[in-house]
Image: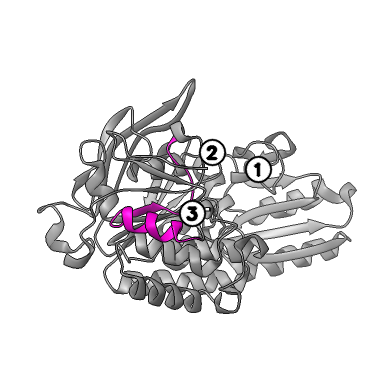
Amino acid sequence: MCVAEPDNDDHLALCGVSRLRGAGVMEAHVDRLAGMSRIGWSVLCCAKYGATNRVVGTKWPVQSGIGSKEEREPDVPGAIVAEGLTKRFGDVLAVAGLDLTVPEGTVLGLLGPNGAGKTTAVSILTTLIEPDSGTALVAGADVVREPQKVRERIGLSGQYAAVDDVLTGYENLEMIGRLYRFDRRRARQRADELLEQFELTDAAHRPVKTYSGGMRRRLDLAGALVAEPPVIFLDEPTTGLDPRSRLGLWEVVRDLVARGTTILLTTQYLEEADQLADEILVIDHGTAIASGTSDELKARVGGERLDLTLGNEAQLETAVMIMRAVATGDVEIEREQQRIVAPVDAGAASLMRVLRELDERGIELHDLSIRRPTLDDVFFALTGHTTAAAQSAGDGDGLPADRREVRTR
């Protein structure tokens, strides 16, 4: 538990804010720290403080307009611009020459499996770590030379919810508002607004330690939106959310963009990027391997997929032969699950043809469906492996690489 003074990096870590609760201590510290912007109610407190809680910057002139356009540097080609970003951790090259541009008022979906470098890239762009090489501008400020300016203009919700368990949901959000130099009335008003928006009103005055995982995640996301900064980073924001909450978050993102907010969204889910992103950048092993709109990426991997699961493993080879006859590309086989996936361009016709041939050969069918490409399909086409195979054991819900086969046409 600590309140660490800012050093020459202008970082200030608030560790264990719950200790400040009660006896007027919390209020005194809020007044003392007023004006410090919140770039991470979640993830990645400065490593030297050894905590995962929140990092805040200083000197955000709230009264003159938070992150207003007139505060930004002129003639910047995008709200977020990065060129040649590289970051190595020991022998691991986490980010390898990454380039990206996010125009103002748009959403970039940064798509990739676990370990692709998404969170490291976000950490660089939000000044939590410095790149080994390359440059990046966020809202017109250089992340290395002007980290304080960057922190004044951004919001961040990290990959894991990092909320204060002892404080209530309401108190968590009120604290963030006071750190933004909101007066007490405005901080409480904003807390009420966000609790209602994220359907947490009934639990507003309960300690966060009593919240479910999904509720904690929603509270964390609400914290990133307290001051509605012009640039927001959302690192896998729907992790742990139920379908209803996920749809609610999507609506929040759409509303923010409609009002001119720029968002960089990392995700493992093509559906999420499909719903929200104006442009998608696919990365693997720290480097960009494809970019384009959702439709453009789907076109690159083929229009649709036939997904077949058998009821009898002995019939797998015959079923593979049938699927290869209609496939427009490589066929993926998962022996343990008796599953075969084939890209096709004549969806309904291919489905009927496969059904007829399976029936004629007496093959026991457990399931056969036609679907649009998924993130796995995109990665399979672009890299030759699936996202699950790219993840370390236990990170994904698919089979390890050595249990998958690829049959070319």
Tell me the SS state at disc 2: loop
Q: Residues within 10 Å of mark 1 (few under 14, many from 20)?
A: few
The span from disc 2 to disc 1 (Cα, nearest Å) is 10 Å
Magenta residues span 23-46
- Residue found 31% across the figure and 48% down from its top: 57
Q: Residue at x 53, y 54 (%)?
A: 18
In magenta segment, residue 386? no
> Can I make out residue 146 in this image?
yes
Are discs 3 and 2 less than 8 Å apart at CB? no
Q: Which residue lies under the disc numbered 1? A: 395
Q: Which residue is mark 3?
A: 20
Gap between marks 1 and 3 measured at Cα: 37 Å
Q: Which mark is residue 281?
A: none
Q: Which residue is mark 2?
A: 115
Q: Residue furthest top?
A: 91
Q: Nearer the viewer, residue 121 or 15?
A: 15
157 or 47, which lies in front? 47
- Residue 350 visible? The answer is no
Label 3 residue SS: helix
Relative height, residue 394 to residue 303 (above, below): above
Secondary structure found at label 1: loop
Q: Amino acid at mark 2?
A: Gly
- The residue under label 1 is which amino acid type? Asp
Mark 2–mark 1 CB contact (< 8 Å): yes
